Image (spheres, rainbow, N blue to C red):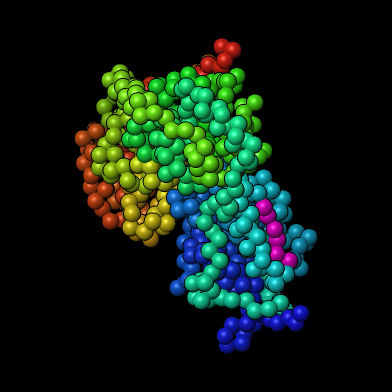
Amino acid sequence: MSTAVSRDQDGTAKTGAELLVDALVQHGVDTVFGFPGDTSIALYDVLLRRTDEIRHILARDERHTGFMADAYTRTTRRIGVCEASSGAGAVYLASGMAEAFASSIPLLAITTDNSRRSHGTAAISEIDQQQLFAACTKWRRTADRVADVPALVAEAIAAATRGRPGPVALILPEDVLEGTEEISGAVTSGPAASSAGLRTIAVPGHRPQASTASVNRAVAWLGAAERPVIVAGGGAQLSGAGAELARLAEHLAVPVATSIHGKGVIDEAHPFALGVVGGNGARDYTNAWVAESDLVLFVGTRANATDTLSFTTPARNHARILHIESDDGRAGRNYPHSIALVGDARTVLEQLRQRVPAAPESLRAARATELAAARREWARTERATVSLPPGVLPPREIVGALSDAFGRDTWVVGDAGTPTPYLSCYWQAPGDGWRVVIPRGHGPMGFAVPASVGIAVAHPGERVLCLTTENSVAMAVGEWETAKRLDLPITYVVLDNTSMAWIKMIQHLYAGGRYFAVDPGPIDPVQLGRGMGLEGARAHTLDEFAELAAKAAGSAGPSLIHAAVPEHMDAPPPVPVWQAALADGSTVRPIH
């Protein structure tokens, strides 16, 4: 076969950087979150010329580009793309991809590297990127030839979106980006390629069915169950399985609980919705229903210690567990003797629904009545607000005020710490996608501020609500400038408890109250925000907070509300997560 240099219409030979951008556009990528470096000059020169086809969102930290791309993927089910340069840039980006890897979020990381000629010379930014990304990606490759670039982009996207989703890394040396090379055939590029593009970035990239044998066994168990329950997680979100999940719940009259990642995969106002289960923001009746069920169907969830209250909800010796999971190595891993249903969540749920007889209407009505009574009793007996010092506001009431001001259709992102249990328990998600984003792969502090940028970019003009903390702000405050520069409609709510309260609680429980390195000095988020152009104020009372929230909900650009909240020791979260009883009666450390 003859070879030809890929050329533009004017006959100019294309570089590796141009082929890279061509390939991204062909696959439907229209947004890249990035931060430039000296090894990425050739790429940025091409991006400058292609702004009509692909937009570049400049972050203030490479780690944050990973968080932005992560949130972009979760809320669109289209693969997010992030970019960083060699050396420290790649190192920072790797830490921003670890959450996506733990949470099975597909994203494409593009990193540039030193010229191959300098490898092994101890160049200032030299690092083995293949080894660096080994712990936080499911696939990683280095482009050794210009001609390899288009095929590697296609391979990377396929790897990210098939099987168990996850982040991938494509590494491009500087000389590959700048060089040209004889390649076979013509390479389509430009707007025509975009309109006729491959469009393979939808998640999931493949929808396999579960095996007939496993479905047969599962159908028999479901048909015999008297008190079944479903627990859905992030895999159900990424599969777009919400509608099929609701259909199965109604078909079988089976309640649906979710992990934090699964929150909102079914409308939490649905008659069969139980809300979040486990050890961080669950309601008591939810945990009780799951623990007392005779069959649990896990759907796209890791079923880890947090999701199951240290494997007590359900217990590990629970009679019958079904587990829908795209990765056969994870299906049923935490619950021996489970039936593993390996396949796409939406597809497998449909397989089950088509095979299991519908529940009688009488059972459907009785179960809905029972669940409604449980919700009413929970609301009636909810703990009264703890008496707090002047100026310190209860997080539960803050979430309620935000819900009143912004409405449940708002995009919401929360950081680790105080935002997590209160959003999980008290914010009612509408069930039309991953609208409440809380990072539970590793629970990284500082995630929500850059993630809110990713969500706002993904959904132009739609309001985003970001609940963060003073310590997370200290890690990510630079992205407030990004939000202002792009005039994004994000409201940042800083819940300030003046300490690293989660770690302080562990020291309280297990170190006899010997507190160390958990009380940093105060910061003033309002002054920080104003320094970057954000309008903001501190709320000293709930009435003030409600007024500020209403104003923010109607504003055009970014805004900021600062509120003091209690340390958890003074006002614990809505469920007793600090000490979870194991089946043998022992205790474990607080569930993060």
Front in this rendered view, residue 517 or 424? 424
Residue 187 falls in which quadrant of the image?
A: bottom right
Q: Is residue 384 above or below residue 180?
A: above
Task: Give coordinates of residue 65: x percent, y percent.
Answer: 52, 54
Residue 129 falls in which quadrant of the image?
A: bottom right
Task: Give coordinates of residue 443: x percent, y percent.
Answer: 52, 38
Q: Is residue 508 above or below residue 102?
A: above
Front in this rendered view, residue 100 or 522? 100
Residue depicted at 50% across the width and 42% down the height: 350
Whether residue 219 is visible, yes or no, is: yes
Whether residue 274 is visible, yes or no, is: no
Task: Give coordinates of residue 479: x percent, y percent.
Answer: 44, 52
Check residue 141 for magenta coloring. yes
Residue depicted at 28% across the width and 44% down the height: 406
Residue 384 falls in which quadrant of the image?
A: top left
Q: Is residue 195 above or below residue 565?
A: below
> Which residue of the protein is positioned furthest toward the right in this rendering?
120
Count numbered badges in the picture.
Answer: 0
Name the main secondary structure of what is drawn in magenta: strand
Task: Tell me where the magenta segment starts and ends, as one range.
Answer: 139-144
Check residue 514 for magenta coloring. no
In this rendering, position of residue 394 left or right of residue 298: left
